[in-house]
Amino acid sequence: MTRQSLFRMRMAGLLRKELRQILRDPSSIALAVVLPLVMLFLFGYGVSLDAEHVPLAMVLQDRAAPARELAARFEGSRYFDVRHAASLSEARRWLDQRKVEGIVCLQSDFAAHIQRQQAASVQVIVNGVDANRARLIQAYARGVLQQWGALRHARGEAAAVPAVTVVQRVWFNEGAVSRNFLVPGLIALIMTLIGTLLTALVVAREWERGTMEAILVTPLRRIDLLLGKLLPYFFLGMAGMGLSVALAVTLFQVPLRGSLSVLFVLSALFMLAALGLGLMISAAVRVQFVAAQISIVTGFLPAVFLSGLLFDLESTPLPIQIVSHVVPARYFVTIIHTLFMAGNVWSVLLPNALALLVMAVLFIALAYRNITKRLEAP
Amino acid sequence: MTVPRRIIALIRKEFALILKDPKSRVVVIVPPLIQFFVFGYAATYDLKNVRYAVLDEDRSAISGRLLARLDGSESFARVGTLTAGHQVAEVLDGRQARLVVHIGSGFSRDLHNGAPVAVQVLVDGRNSNSALLALGYIGTIVEQFNRQLAAEGLVALSGPGVALVERAWFNPNLQSRWYIVSALGGIISMVVVMILTSLSVAREREFGTFDQLLVAPFTPAEILIGKSLPGICFGLIDALLFSLGAVFWYGVPFRGSPAALLLVLIGFVVTIVGVGLLVSSMAKTMQQALMGAFVFMMPAVILSGFTTPIENMPGWLQAGTLLNPVRYIITALRLIFLQGADTAAVWPQLWPLLVMAAVTLPVAGRLFRHRSQ
């Protein structure tokens, strides 16, 4: 027999074994299919950074027409659910008990000031515990006030219009819908889970169960072993990714402005990097418990915190930004956000794809080196 | 052997399993601490040094003053000055800048004539949250600029406007780090506890030692205690370390009572140990157990309000979060740290945790006994 047909036979046997191990164990299928589905539904329908219907306490110490008109504009805003409080102290109690998230207070001299063309003030108090949400609520309140000012100006009631106004446009995501930003990022997380976490256990498991010794006496070479471990999980991960993309586009209406083939090629690169990391850990550690811990610390958690999936990396201190450069998910999150919302922007895609390629090659090479065909620990 | 000595022997064996292996020993203490410090800095919604480019077609003294205000703010960092409109798309597409400020050619003329003047701001919406925040910052800066112009009499304002007086309670400077870091300890200790406990029974089952444990003269309650104590201990130690770190390293205020903190942490860690053992008892292999842990943890963290507010979720999902133990610890930690809650104030968060702990642990105990028969 030729060397090539021998190789094919060995690979076919090993792949069959690995594939059976996956298929016999419904939990890996669950991880590739069920978990992405659950997460996509949660992110698509449930999770949002956009505040609407914020419960707000309104304290009207002044019952004159201008005060009532401004209050009505707060009530009409879709961002607020207004409850009227009898006094400021009652509103404060509501804020303490978390029944409302903010207070708008119009003091007793509000209308008088307005009528005398003096500056009237509107007090806005927000619960600052969630700083991000507090800022949004403040901005919404400012918007309501500005619209009211413009209305009064148009009626010739001589309210000041600001000298300079800001005309804003949000590119790539016109409505600034947080779902368009969260759902593609989630795909990176799901692939990390399958690629790094699942594979981190596969070689360690063979050592721990002692089946590695059985493999050592077979004519399998290191490269056969590596490919046998890599390929089944690669397809599992790509299946999870394909499913996620299909759902993101069809069900959640996330725009996909780049091309699908570029998305698949670059996802495959990321999948290889994630798999390489998992196999590297697995080969180096040989104990499932420790392999699991390390893969969570180096794979999963950085994919959440250091990838730009949720938090803006550029606002973090410099050391954190430097550390984030060794996280594969960072490059892929940039790629996937660009591909979904902006399109095939090669000046963004190419450098990040190159980084992924380097990492994939490096991790897989290190995994290859560490899968020794010897009994003693490396 | 008397009962206490039996249990002590079992507990010693469970601790030895974690502590005898130098790799496992390091793994339960060092990575959680590193995570706490790295992620505490990484997890922020505040914007700093947003890279922006300027297209100033007016090039007047007054447009220069508006831009100087932007440059002077630590939220923005100028990375480029554009000369033509077509460059806007290039810098935004290629992420060289995340925001472009466009000042039209009539800016200073219109301003002096009292005509309405607009500054166009184009922002990269790939991160929608950052985009909205950056626009908010710009709005504030422009507002200050307007006030300055009016004060100098450079523009004629038709009358005094309505001023907004803004105040934020509990977090006056609106630092999102307080919000994240106060709750981060709960999340990281949950990960440690889930991994420790979900793998513990699964490992014995994979190695076949669990059957030996069952035929040994232990009652199910004793096995349960032996299996849950290491998780409870390490989880509590980690969570308390993180609380200290939040206060002394990150400067998060601690306004509530330490007793309340200890109580909610105990309630939470015991609940999570119960969930972990539940997962463990249903898994045949460690790989399955690990996946089970994630199937619980990922939705639980997402639906906890840790990173995205529960109030933004649709009503049916908000109702669903009432079954999520992580929701209660996150709310309780923020109440205690930032809003100064004592045990009474945190009771609405505490009793669901105690109920869940009282349910999950016995169920786990029964389940891993039954599954082996």
Image: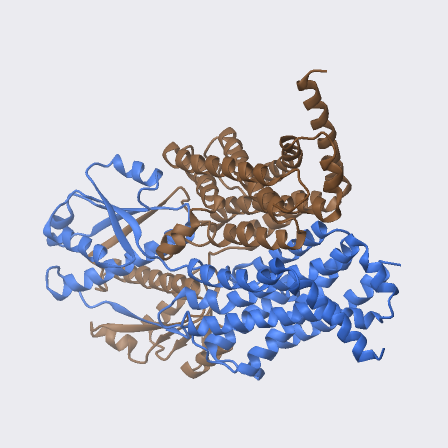
The front one of B361 and B326 is: B361
- Look at chain A in the picture and name its colour: brown
Residue at 42% from the left image edge and 47% from the top image edge: A325
Residue A322, given in percent of the width and then of the height, sits at 39, 50
From what the image shows, is residue A269 above or below residue B370? above
The front one of B217 and B363 is: B217
Residue at 47% from the left image edge and 56% from the top image edge: A49
The chain whose colour is blue is: B
Judged left or right of residue B14, residue B42 is left
Residue at 49% from the left image edge and 45% from the top image edge: A329
Residue A17: name its quadrant. Answer: top right
Query: Can the viewer see residue B356?
Result: no
Residue A289, given in percent of the width and then of the height, sits at 66, 55
The front one of A255 and A234 is: A234
Residue B132: name its quadrant. Answer: bottom left
From what the image shows, is residue A162 above or below residue A213? below
From what the image shows, is residue A253 above or below residue B138? above
Residue A124: name its quadrant. Answer: bottom left
Judged left or right of residue B304, residue A318 is left
Q: Which quadrant of the figure contains the C terminus of chain A? A: top right
Residue B16, given in percent of the width and then of the height, sits at 69, 66
From what the image shows, is residue A32 above or below residue B369? above
Judged left or right of residue B205, residue B316 is left
Query: Can the viewer see residue A42?
Result: yes
Residue at 50% from the left image edge and 38% from the top image edge: A362
Residue B294, given in percent of the width and then of the height, sits at 64, 54
